[in-house]
Amino acid sequence: GERSDASVADVWFKSRIAKVIEDVTGHMDEYQFSLAAERAYDFLWHELADWYVEINKFQSNPALVRHGLETALKLLHPFVPFVTEAIWQELYPDQLLMMAEWPKAHGTDRDAAAEEQFSAVQDIVTQIRNIRAHYKIPYTKQFTVYATTDTSTEVTHIIEQLCKVKLAHHTAPSGHTTDIINPSYHFTVSLGDLIDVAAERKRLEKELAQLDKYIANQERKLGNKEFTDKAPVEIVEKEQANLGQKKAERTHLEEALEKLG
């Protein structure tokens, strides 16, 4: 049964179910089987498993989880029939998946505003997780994220649960901070509480020195006409791309250093 008090996550997920049915059906109609399989797989792993199942650990709607799983199994059945049939039998021992109807997309379930809102939340969650990974903050350590934009009770709850953080709706204390920003939200993390700023600065400066050395060598190599004339074009292009990537890394490092003050 459907819940009447549909949450932001529920509305987003129903919209994504309708979208994946549209996409996979469209690819199948155009005989684009590889694209159809990729899209169904992407839905199963990156929308159902990575996000909706994780949210259901603290905000439960088992009927919609089941509906999402059933849809994924039906869409994937043409590509991995034995696996999907075996899983279906666990759900419905007296029914065959191969006899089930192909899912139909309900256009009324599509909700662009909910998708946009949830996408902004996903981006914030990813950015907070990246900060945790970048500064090697243990997953068990809860820290405070300061919100300078309004967030609904539900969005606050999702961010707190998925990131193991506490949201505070006031300005961050002055000092070493890093910002988490997208068009919908603006949060700040106070780094002084979480890391040894001096040690982190030292680590970044060491990385920057190594990167500068590498970039200088690479520029010298690509500035050598003998190398660029004689080496195969794809090798030269690969080296140029590599240099571009290292320069981008250098910019990120400089920004990280700047944030440390």
Image: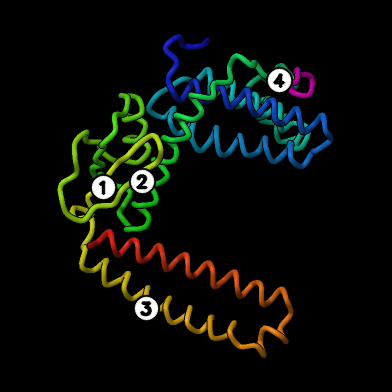
Q: Quadrant of the C terminus?
A: bottom left
Q: Would you name the residue on which mark 3 appears?
A: 209
Q: Nearer the viewer, mark 2 or mark 3?
A: 3
Which amino acid does the dot numbered 1 rest on? Val
Q: Position of residue 31 (x, y in %)?
A: 84, 35
**Separation of marks 1 and 3 at Cα, in angstroms:** 27 Å
The reply to whether discs 2 and 1 touch (Cβ–Cβ < 8 Å) is: yes
- Circle 2: is it few (<14), some (14-19), or many (20+) Cα within 10 Å? many
Q: Is residue 148 above or below residue 131?
A: above
**Above or below, comparing residue 122 to residue 129 in the picture:** above
Please indicate whether residue 98 sits to the left or right of residue 2 in the image: right
| Among the 4 quarters of the image, the one containing residue 71 | top right
| Image spot of residue 14 (x, y percent) | 55, 21
Task: State how the image is colored.
Answer: rainbow
Q: Would you call the spot at circle 4 few (<14 residues within 10 Å), some (14-19), or many (20 or more)?
A: some
**Residue occupied by mark 2:** 128
Residue at image position (52%, 67%) is 245
Magenta region: which residues? 97-104
Residue 123 placement (x, y as % from top left)? 44, 41
Is 243 placed left or right of 121 in the picture? Answer: right
Question: In front: mark 2 or mark 4?
Answer: 2
Amino acid type shown at disc 4: Pro
Q: To which residue does mark 4 refer?
A: 103
Mark 1 lies on residue: 189
Instruction: Give the amino acid type for the residue marked by disc 3 in the picture.
Output: Ala
Residue drawn at point x = 74 percent, y = 36 percent: 36
User: How far apart, in angstroms, are the residues tagged by discs 2 and 3?
Assistant: 27 Å
State the separation of the CA atoms marked 2 and 1: 9 Å
- Dot 1 falls on a residue whose secondary structure is strand
User: Was residue 127 drawn as part of the magenta stretch in this picture?
Assistant: no
